Image: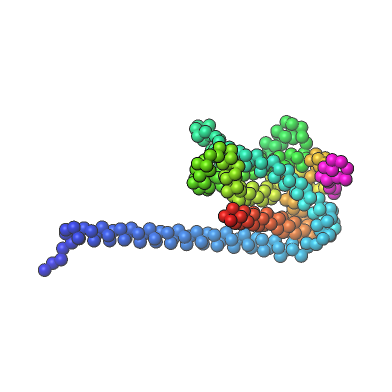
Amino acid sequence: MAVTTDGPMGAASKTNQEAFDAVSRAQKKDILFATGGLIVMAIAMTLLLTLIGDLVIRGAGRISADFMTSYPSRLPQRAGILSAWVGTLYVMVVTAFLAIPIGVAAGLYLEEYAKKGWLSNFIEINVSNLAGVPSIVYGLLALGLFVYGFNLGKTILVAGMTLALLILPIVIVSTREAVRSIPKIIKEGAYGLGADQWQVMWNYVIPAARPGILTGAIVGLSRAIGETAPIITIGALTFIAFLPPPPVTGDFPFLSFAWLNEGFTVLPIQMFNWTSRPQADFHTIAATTGVVLIALTFSLNGIAIWIRYRLRKGYRN
């Protein structure tokens, strides 16, 4: 007697088989996608580690106290990066002082206070787009606006303002994402206890979002520290054998801002200058400068990871 699949039981069995086949196909696609992603990541990491390894092998042996405390020289044996790393430090201080408060305030306003409408949507779209604008565009903007428009000159202040504009969208976006990640029940509970909007934001939203905010800010600074195009555009010096005035003095009020109006150079510019020389010894110390720059970048990212871990741990406790 022939077995037929007609009837409710046969239809259910056929439906179950089709669902099983669909799940199997989806799992195969997931495996293929994951495998492709791993292959691409492995290739990218191999290339990155190869470049970093080559840089370290060529330049790590040249790192010394004399190299860190000497000015650039026309003789590669005597050249150092004192003015470059000090200039980088000064520029990063200005960048952080401008970009972090403004970016965090803008992100909090857009996420907590701005009314949803066409204007806020327009601002959000433009902020996201600005994060992908080439850095040379910011350099041209700063050259026309700050250097020639406001006549501020080619100074540390202008460099910090330029890099602050560059990383401002990153800080804004990271702040908004950190605020969005906070469970709504925290804010609703605070409102239920009678807190107003400012109290909720200051006492609940900002402490909970602080790890993400600081992580985004430090990642933005990590990008800024290696930028070359906007700094070259505004006129950074390629050879400088002096240091700006110190920000701390021995006379009242013990603070000096004269360094903001001084000429400067930074590590990427110094590295670029040495790689353009024909002598092999200059290429070696350029690689050494690259090692120092990579170490600074990794240090900033490590600090971001540590801060995020400590703040999240403290918030949970």
**Magenta span main SS:** loop
Image vertical order of residue 129 relative to residue 315, above or below: above
In-front residue for pair 234/189: 189
Q: How is the image coloured?
A: rainbow
Judging depth in this view, the residue of 127 and 93 nearest the camera is 93
Give the farthest residue toward the bottom. Answer: 1
Quarter of the picture containing the N terminus is: bottom left
Magenta-colored span: 241-255
> Percent position (x, y) of residue 106?
61, 38
Vertical arrangement, residue 33 with respect to residue 87, above or below: below
**Left of 128 or right of it: where is 299?**
right
In the image, taking residue 123 as reference, residue 97 lies left or right, namely right
Decide whether residue 30 is among the magenta residues: no
Determine if residue 305 is in view.
Answer: no
The quadrant where residue 10 appears: bottom left
Q: Is residue 154 visible?
A: yes
Name the residue located 47 percent from the left edge and 62 percent from the top edge. 35
Point out the residue furthest to the right here. Answer: 251
In depth, the one of 15 and 217 nearer the eye is 217
